[in-house]
Amino acid sequence: QVQLVESGGGSVQAGGSLRLSCAASVYTYGSYYMGWFRQAPGKEREGVAAIATGGGSTFYAGSVKGRFTISRDNAKNTLFLQMNSLKPEDTAMYYCAAAPPFAGGSWIRAPLEQYKYNYWGQGTQVTVSS
């Protein structure tokens, strides 16, 4: 079983930055594929960024590419999302998610699809004001 706890959300003005963290309680964290998703009020949850097990491959939604950076520290079982140049449309609940090791080849074909992920955190709210 994998437990995920997000932190780092908050309120910021447009153009500001936030860094989200996700702490994972699993012995083999380094073997899980990880992603960040978000859901704004009245909208469906969407994939924001994803990262492979070793951190060498990363993927981003077009709306955040160049502004957000996903990274992971496998020694500390932690996932990060650095968000810069925030916009009001980035306002949402942000979730981290984990895909199991056997996802492998399937995950790489659609890393931002939520059905690839088995484990989810409770979310952290990000609010960006104009």
Image (spheres, rainbow, N blue to C red):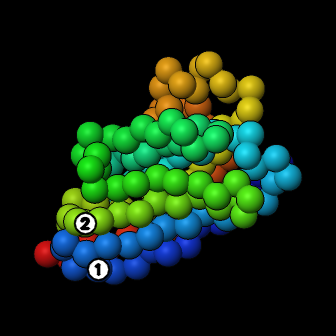
What is the secondary structure assignment of the residue under circle 2? loop
Write the residue at 43% across / 45% down.
49
Residue 117's quadrant in the figure? top right
How many badges with numbers are in the image?
2
* Residue visible at 49% across and 67% down in the picture: 20
Say above or below: 80 vs 128.
Answer: above
Residue 84 to residue 27: above or below: below
Residues 89 and 41: in front is: 89
Q: Amino acid at mark 1?
A: Val
Q: Quadrant of the C terminus?
A: bottom left
Name the side, left or right, on which 83 lies relative to 31.
left
Instruction: Work out which residue is located at the far front of the displayed protein and give it.
Output: 56
Q: Identify the residue at image location x=51%, y=36%.
A: 57
**Can residue 65 be seen?**
yes
Q: Are marks 2 and 1 in contact (CB under 8 Å)?
A: yes
Amino acid type indicated by mark 2: Leu
Q: Nearer the viewer, residue 40 or 35?
A: 35
Residue 47 shows in this picture:
no
Which residue was labeled with disc 1?
12
41 vs 67, nearest the viewer: 67
Q: Position of residue 27 (x, y in %)?
A: 85, 52
Q: Residue at x 66, y 24 (%)?
A: 104
Measured as percent of width and height from the top left, residue 68 is found at 35, 55
